[in-house]
Image (cartoon, rainbow, N blue to C red):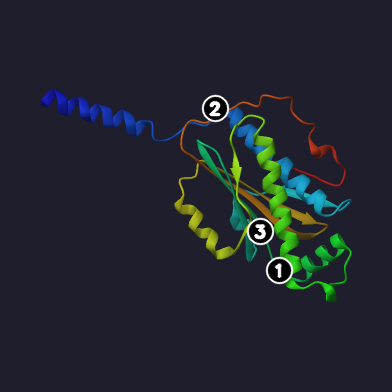
Amino acid sequence: MRALANYSTSSLNKIESRTVPTISADFDALLRDAFQRSVQLALREALANAEWKIERTPDSKNINKSEAFVLTVAGVLFRLVLVLHFNFDPALKQFVQDAVGQQQDKLDDDKVYDFVAEISNCFCGGLKRELQAAVPSLGMSTPNRLAHASLKYLSMLKLAREGHVLARLGDVPMFGCSFYLSAYGDLNYTKQIASQQSTTEVGELEMF
């Protein structure tokens, strides 16, 4: 019995030591590169020839917004929560007006929200496509609009990685974008196809 008890304790300790998944440097780099490119492409598609400046920020506390669209990309061993942060304000309405070519007095709130939701969908879809170069069987959700205060509950997740950027249109901090990674197993995926040319070479987008 004592030997069995010692064996059980040893086995539990080994199991507990494996409960924190490892994330390879290759997968970490793949995820962060995919995040960067998907943000850039989504914003470029939303408003062509705009002067976007995208700045990394250490956490979402530096993204002072009131609302967010939240989506997920899920695989067998991980889940990504993606967030597009924004304020519903005159600057956003002007941005949507410029993008769709419609006067503000003809833009109702639903049209503005629909356009921002489509940006978040493009952001999520782009990231999913990038990751599928290495990760099979990924699924993604549709956008869900939440009050920004709801994001505090993300801290309850066992987060393995996160990343954040602030996107400025000229001098206006128009959007924030974030990813939050929860891992359920070791993530050692490696990209299987040639890397796409980085969109940082496109003149209207800047990442630093």
- Residue 129 is labelled as none
**Residue at point 74%, 41% (across, down):** 37
Quarter of the figure with residue 34: top right
Q: Which of marks 3 and 2 precedes in the sequence?
A: 3
Mark 1 → mark 3, Cα distance in angstroms: 10 Å
**Residue under numbered circle 2:** 188
Compared to 22, does 160 lie above or below?
A: below
Q: Position of residue 24 (x, y in %)?
A: 55, 28
Compared to 22, does 87 lie above or below?
A: below
Question: Hey, what amino acid is under mark 2?
Answer: Asn
**Residue at point 18%, 26% (across, down):** 6
Q: Nearer the viewer, residue 207 or 9?
A: 9
Question: Hey, what amino acid is under mark 3?
Answer: His
- Residue 88 is labelled as 1
Compared to 118, does 139 lie above or below?
A: above
Quarter of the figure with residue 36: top right
* SS assignment at label 1: loop
Q: Which of marks 2 and 1 precedes in the sequence?
A: 1
- Residue 85 is labelled as 3
